[in-house]
Image: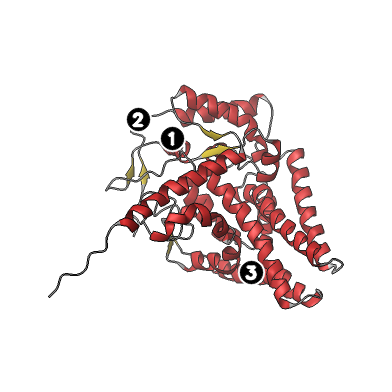
Amino acid sequence: MARPLKFTNVQRSTFFATVRARADAYFRDNHLSRHANGAMWAKTLFFLAAFVLTYALILSNQFGVAAMAGLAALLGAICAFIGFNVCHDALHGSFSASKRVNKTLGWVFNLIGASPYVWNITHNVVHHTYTNIAGHDEDIEVAPGLIRLDASEPVRPIQRFQHWYAFPVYGLASLSWVLRKDYKKFFQPKIGQQVANHPRREYFNLFFNKAIYYALFIVLPLLVLDIAWWQFVLGFGLMHFVEGLTLGLVFQLAHVVEGTAFPLPDKQGDLREAWAVHQLRTTANFAPHSPLASFLCGGLNRQIEHHLFPKVCHIHYPALARIVRQTAHEFGLPYLENRTFLGALQSHRRVLRQLGAEAWVAAAKPVREPAAA
């Protein structure tokens, strides 16, 4: 069982108090809400309309095989972008000051195949508290035994090649989410340090909302589309591969790149640093000045700001980034960035290769024969 953890600010760091006060002053002095503005609502309507239009075009049955494959791939990407831009903020409560608005937009998460309730526990509570801590942050458990993302994880011979096969495996993340992950997380005794004591209504919500997804994306297409079953399987798989790869890469480029730490607690379960300092050491931004990356990734390319201010809508992250960067430098703390998406991707691949290199050493060790009786 994972030992309960606690953060102890042994350095008496005032970084978080300072950066929070400066952020508060920014919103107050500029008379700004921390929630969505007009640009955020326009982006939300754009992605939701794109989702409905692409889905309707697929069900129209008016296109050939190649065009249908392209639409399936596009729908997968749009589903990921809705997750980043709409549902993610809503589930953090940062989209709107209205709980009803947040709950409504958060429910859309079901339409991309994931449970908002399970996500709130695994991501909002566990990942955001215990970022990059093995045995506690379940978001870094990507195909355990197959992909090694932390030096504390066991070494397997196959990991010698993980810098090649990891990316196709990331593409399976969405399909696993739809068919397996939510059920597994929901019914395991604990999620991180959270005891799985779910309200009764969440049992119904899990199965009911999954049934809606299966009806919309499996049953209905099979009923109305003039295609063979194997063509549907390929299209469904392509949609989820694009969605899963997009989701997987955005997460990995923010937490598993050169410079990010994977701290281990002491024997008493104590992490001897402030929580906010821990977030700076375990999180990285990528392509922070790319308008396209910011538009598509819902601000998750500025992951540092998101982890420090999860209750602030991502539309405000560019302004907050200037405050956080300056304050981190004043306190002598890391502020990790990869200037481009490609640079972050290459950094992640180098980490995979480095962590897989130990498997070459393990594979080269001779196997000892058991001693004769």
Q: Position of residue 122 (x, y in %)?
A: 51, 56
Name the foreground residue: 372 vs 143: 372
Disc 1 to disc 3, how far (Cα)? 38 Å
Residue 305 or residue 228, whichever sits in front: 228
The reply, left or right, for residue 41 in relation to residue 181 is right
Dot 3 falls on a residue whose secondary structure is helix
Furthest-right residue in this view: 62
Residue at 57% x, 60% y is: 173
**Contact, mark 1 vs mark 2 (Cβ under 8 Å):** yes
Q: Is residue 258 above or below residue 333?
A: below
Mark 1 is on which residue type? Answer: Val
Residue 342: x, y in percent? 60, 41
Q: Which mark is residue 11?
A: 2
Q: Residues within 10 Å of mark 2 (few under 14, many from 20)?
A: few
Residue 121 visible? The answer is no
Contact check, label 1 and label 3, Cβ < 8 Å: no
Look at 66% across and 72% down and name the residue there. Answer: 211
Which residue type does callout 2 highlight?
Answer: Gln
Q: Which numbered marker is on residue 277?
A: 1
Q: Secondary structure at mark 1?
A: helix
Question: On residue 238, which mark appears?
Answer: none
Distance from the alpha carbon under mark 1 to that under mark 2: 10 Å
Position of the N terminus, as image quadrant, is bottom left
Q: Which residue is mark 3?
A: 210
Element class at badge 2: loop
Give how far across and how far down residue 131 sits, in percent.
46, 46
* Residue 30 image offset from top left, x and y in percent: 68, 25
- Dot 3 surroundings within 10 Å: few (below 14), some, or many (20 or more)? many
Which of the image's four quarters has the C terminus? bottom left
Q: Quadrant of residue 76?
A: bottom right
**Residue 12 appears left or right of 341:** left
